[in-house]
Image: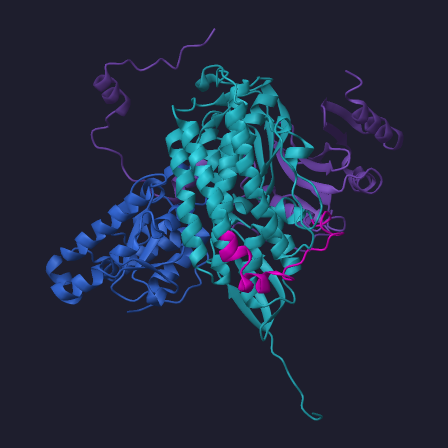
Amino acid sequence: MKEDWGKEAGNIIANWARKHSLWVLAYGTGCGAIELPPTMTSKYDAERFGLRGAATPRQADVLLISGYLAVKTLKRVIRTYEQMQAPKYVIGFGSCTINGGMYWDSYNTVKRLDDYLPVDVFINGCMPRPESVIDGIIGLQKLITEDKAYGWIKYQKNLDWYRANQKKVIKNWKMPDYNW
Amino acid sequence: MAGIIKQEKETTLYLGPQHPGITGNMMIELKVTGDTIQRGKTHVGYLHRGFEKLMEERLWMQCFPIVCRICVPEPDPNEENLARAIEELEGREVPERAKYIRVLVLEMSRLATYLLWMGGQSGSAGLYTMPQWTVGDRDYILDLFEELTGGRVYHMYIWAGGVRRDLPDGFKGRVLKVMDYLEERLVEYDRLLFENAIFLKRAIGVGVIDKEKAMEWGVVGPPLRGCGIAHDVRKDEPYEVYDKLDWELITHEGGDVYSRAMVRRKEIEQSISIIRQVLDKMPSGPVHNPGPNPLKWKVPSGEAYVRTESARGEFGYYVVSDGSLRPRRVHVRGPAYVHGVSLLERMLPGTNIADVSFIMNSLGTCPPEIER
Amino acid sequence: MSDELKQEQEITQIIHKTFKSAAVEIKRAGRLAVKLRSDLLPPFISYLKDYMQFKHLVMISGVDWIEENAFELVYHLYSYERKIHVMVKVRLDRNNPQMQTLLPFWDHAGTYEREIHEMLGIHFEGNPDLGEFILEDWDDIPPMRRDFKTVEYVNDLYEWREGREDRQDVRKTIAEQYDETIPDFDKEEK
């Protein structure tokens, strides 16, 4: 399917520009948000990679899901993700996005993040160190150079599958229907 | 100006899950006319994991790693509370050296939380240099924690019967070096934040708590001491070795954001002095009083209520056991439970929209422990 | 021994004079537990608050004793002057749990009651705010009850990721690497 996706995304110069200025939405959705301020300050300076915080979804490129997602937050995160402009990337941060982590038997948290949102990079750990966060960002940059990070196109093409999974967990679905 | 009828419309504003400054996710529904708030209603539940139900399904030993994640900025008082509750139910004694090490860990955690609070409070006022300084300085304390316990944020170091392992060689020298460095930095923080004209103008007279009504509204911790009322769990019900150390209780009159900030600022100096005394007076000996096989460990039946003073106020645990392998009921009382829901709704009418997250940071609201 | 617990014994006698059916137990220095009939609760709390300086409501907890077919509500009160903590315990019928609200005494009692209503299903008369507090669109039984099975609920609703294909036991690999044996956790200690 790679030939299909490559035509829409862009050429070498556009990818080079995108990977060197990734703006992260400043929304801490779970426990992992406590290791993000140390990543942005002077000891593990992430701003030298072009990373900075963005205040609104319209101005952000990367959605960093830091930790577990309660079902109430999942509803807001889906709406935020759909408001971001393409090209956009999702990073799953911590073990809770991979297989439920520490809260594997909790009735209110989501176990596999890529059933509900298209994830490009997973970062392992509980709590991942700031060096791991930077490692994840560099991994995402490598994927962008190699023309492999197309989460947003995957979401558009498989929208029915994602919607079915989301509606199974979120019982009262009162959200606008984006039809691109 | 006769003949002009002014009609002011009331709009609903949702101040969303993210806030400036470093608080958690909480939504406040405001009814505003112009820039003044008429009333507010808090909505919580964005970070609910169901801890109390999870703890009923796990063995007693498996509760310790999960209990630190209840309060994200300050995990150590949780482990201390659960360990002391189990020791009270079993009647187990803790060695002297372990008590001194527990006080050292609790005070270091209190320092780290106060530094993070300073960053959050000035970030919500728009002074963005302070978070860069204080969060960077907090990294030195987290490096000490990593050397002692193995983890930067979640330690899992204090458990029932003592602490997990002894101090490494040369640890005392490194701690004292960090304390000297922090005392020099306090002078810079004073000049930048606590004597800054912008901060004083925004903080004095804002978010006032009435002194007569403070106890009835359930206020605890630095907000209570900022009204001039002298209560602290470390003096009322001394635990570990706080009654053998030399320190004093700090209060400040006024009840507004400025007096709460000054209480926390002076408590930083108090914590540094306690850490120095603990390192001086520490005796030698074992650090753990071992119990039975952890996979077959049954705690005798009964109930216990244990309280600790964390950086935000009185932290309480109510533990009920029925003599089996798993706890019957563990109920956690976070200090921000009252401050974040009912006290905030009382203080909002009449303030500006820009002051809402400023007041939230000064009360110390932390949504992960409101909804666990 | 009786010198140290003087204040606790004094309080026990004062309570017994007015409320003869209350059963008071001194657990240790600074902790008292009182068992009470459920209709006597509002006058008892008002007596402790106004006449005996127990002005600080610490929290209200709910415990589910499903074997005895009862809910238990525990009201924790603390007095800053006397430095004593009292746990007032009340039992309710599990099929129809009802209680009076303490909202006129303390503002924040309303918050605790909202949470107990949502998590255990106990109804508090006089509290206007009982409704959704922490959970959103919940359609099952209240989750803190003992007959709510979490693992079955989770297996129904969420999907798991499969584990490693070779089903390797990591403990054995690491023990072989370091020439050690895995300790036997199944044997009983003496």
Name the tint of chain C in the rendering. purple
- Asked if residue A114 lies left or right of residue B292, the reply is left
Residue B201 sits above or below residue C180 on the image = below
- Does B46 lie within the magenta span? no
Looking at this view, is B305 or A175 the one in front? B305
Residue B102 sits above or below residue B272 on the image = above
Colour style of the rendered protein structure = by chain
Q: Residue at x 44, y 54 (%)?
A: B131
Name the tint of chain B in the rendering. cyan
Residue that extends furthest to the top in the rendered view of this protein: C190
Looking at this view, is B330 or B22 the one in front? B22
Q: Residue at x 22, y 17 (%)?
A: C176
Q: Is residue C68 visible?
A: yes
Q: Position of residue B320 (x, y in %)?
A: 60, 28
Range of residues picked out in magenta: B189-217
Name the tint of chain A in the rendering. blue
Q: Quadrant of residue A109?
A: top left
- Give the position of the N terminus of chain C as an image quadrant: top right
Q: Quadrant of residue B315?
A: top right
- Does B206 lie within the magenta span? yes
Q: Is residue B43 visible?
A: no
Q: Position of residue B370 (x, y in %)?
A: 55, 46
Q: Position of residue B317 (x, y in %)?
A: 59, 34
Q: Position of residue B331 (x, y in %)?
A: 58, 36
Residue A92 sits above or below residue B129 on the image = above
- Asked if residue B295 lies left or right of residue C165, the reply is right
Looking at this view, is B90 or C35 the one in front? B90
Looking at this view, is B342 or B297 the one in front? B342
Residue that extends furthest to the left in the rendered view of this protein: A3
Residue B156 sits above or below residue B224 on the image = above
